[in-house]
């Protein structure tokens, strides 16, 4: 029996690794998530993801040829390293491209940063479809953006276009090396908010996630001040980015979109007041799944597959094992029943 070729999408995150197997026509055959086990280091985390992907291929598409693998990751992936990847110790020294080719011999390999993969998914099937130019803002544990021009996600000379987490924060930062200054991501990101709140000692400040801190801020003045400062500084940088790009639309994705009700008003006011031509500001269509969807898109492109452009394929099933509210699955692989990707996320 001849099995039709399949593609694999892999999203390596700081807290979880998600995988999805799809046919060349866009039908989802299965998906899984595992914990990244970041505390064990880069090698253990990478091997954990590869093992989960192989198990998924064996169960969802036994005997099928693997045509291509698309990978999204924190940091900037290269054949022999991953730049700007502090989330897991040793990830920057991992020869990611080489390791992927060794793990999946014969398959085409494509890689992208998580934000750029997410932007690709939003351009192809989501909130940025038909928007030129556009900005994808990733608000998760870290902070980054992706620029979309002519329907293409801009990589940059070193793959680092849109890495606004490294922005200068003050005039005094000019001329200082990266290690000598406080990066924007160290102050404006989900991880930074959680750390700052924990140091305050305020009720609700020991919450584990930025979303919980945002929620608790409605009843605690010190947390409310922290959240307001977060939104104001983020708005400062987003307005400057919008002035430079003049986007039609800005889509915001990542785990912090769960706090959209608190984020949007301040960001929208700043964009309306500070830009000559204010862009539309919207939540991403796939706030939790976009990097994995983008990885699948990379794999489909590498395999020469062309899923329907009208959204009848690869358009947003919750691929990564999360519930529709964005709650991550547990540490063991979570296999989903086969189905098509035409199932849409419901808000």
Image: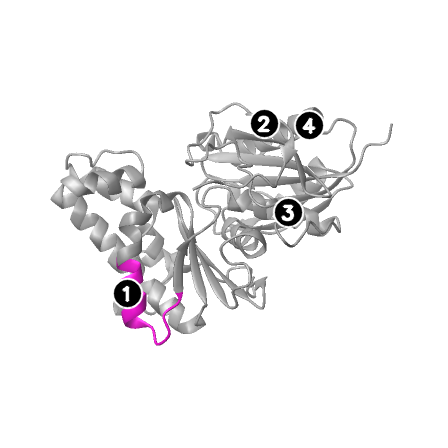
Q: Identify which residue is drawn at 52% across, 50% down.
A: 118
Secondary structure state at the residue bearing disc 2? loop
Extreme left residue here?
221
**Residue 93 can be seen in this image:** no
Q: Identify which residue is drawn at 14% across, 37% down.
A: 202
User: Quick one: label 2 or label 1, which is nearer the N terminus?
Assistant: 1
Q: For residue 243, what is the image quadrant? A: bottom left
Secondary structure state at the residue bearing disc 1? helix
Question: Disc 2 designates what residue?
Answer: 336
Marks 4 and 3, how far apart in space? 21 Å
Q: Nearer the viewer, mark 2 or mark 3?
A: 3
Where residue 11 sits: x, y (%)?
55, 41
Marks 2 and 4, how far apart in space? 9 Å
Question: Disc 4 designates what residue?
Answer: 60
Categorize mark 1 by other alpha carbons within 10 Å: few (<14), some (14-19), many (20+). Answer: some
The disc at residue 312 is 3
Look at the magenta stretch and give its main secondary structure. Answer: helix
Secondary structure state at the residue bearing disc 3? loop
Is 276 covered by the magenta stretch?
Answer: yes
The disc at residue 270 is 1
Q: Nearer the viewer, mark 4 or mark 3?
A: 3
User: Quick one: label 2 or label 3, which is nearer the N terminus?
Assistant: 3
Extreme right residue here?
1
Q: Identify which residue is drawn at 81% across, 32% down.
A: 3
User: Quick one: label 4 or label 1, which is nearer the N terminus?
Assistant: 4
């Amino acid at each position: 029996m001849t099995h039709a070729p399949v593609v694999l999408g892999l999203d390596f995150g700081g807290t979880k690794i998600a995988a999805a197997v799809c046919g060349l026509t866009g039908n989802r055959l299965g998906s899984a998530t595992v914990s990244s086990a970041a505390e064990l280091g880069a090698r253990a985390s990478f091997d954990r993801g590869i093992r989960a992907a192989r198990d998924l291929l064996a169960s969802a598409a036994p005997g099928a040829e693997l045509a291509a693998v698309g990978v999204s990751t924190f940091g900037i992936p290269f054949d022999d390293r991953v730049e700007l990847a502090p989330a897991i110790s040793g990830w920057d020294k991992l020869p990611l491209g080489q390791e992927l080719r060794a793990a999946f011999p014969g398959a085409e390999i494509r890689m992208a940063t998580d934000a750029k993969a997410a932007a690709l998914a939003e351009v192809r099937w989501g909130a940025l479809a038909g928007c030129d130019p556009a900005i994808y803002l990733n608000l998760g544990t870290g902070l980054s953006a992706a620029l979309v021009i002519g329907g293409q996600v801009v990589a940059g000379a070193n793959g680092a276009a849109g890495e606004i987490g490294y922005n200068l924060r003050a005039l005094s930062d000019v001329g200082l090396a990266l290690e000598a200054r406080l990066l924007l991501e160290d102050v404006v990101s989900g991880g930074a908010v959680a750390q700052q709140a924990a140091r305050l000692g305020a009720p609700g400040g020991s919450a584990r996630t930025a979303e919980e801190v945002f929620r608790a801020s409605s009843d605690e003045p010190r947390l409310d001040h922290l959240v307001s400062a977060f939104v104001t500084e983020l708005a400062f940088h987003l307005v400057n980015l919008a002035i430079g790009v003049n986007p039609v639309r800005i889509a915001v994705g990542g785990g912090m979109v769960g706090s959209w009700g608190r984020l949007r008003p301040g960001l929208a006011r700043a964009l309306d007041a500070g830009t000559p031509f204010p862009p539309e500001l919207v939540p991403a269509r796939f706030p939790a799944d976009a990097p994995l969807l983008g990885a699948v898109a990379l794999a489909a492109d590498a395999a020469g597959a062309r899923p329907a452009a009208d959204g009848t394929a690869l358009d947003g099933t919750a691929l990564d094992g999360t519930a529709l509210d964005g709650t991550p699955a547990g540490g063991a692989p979570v296999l989903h029943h086969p189905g098509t990707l035409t199932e849409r996320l419901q808000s």
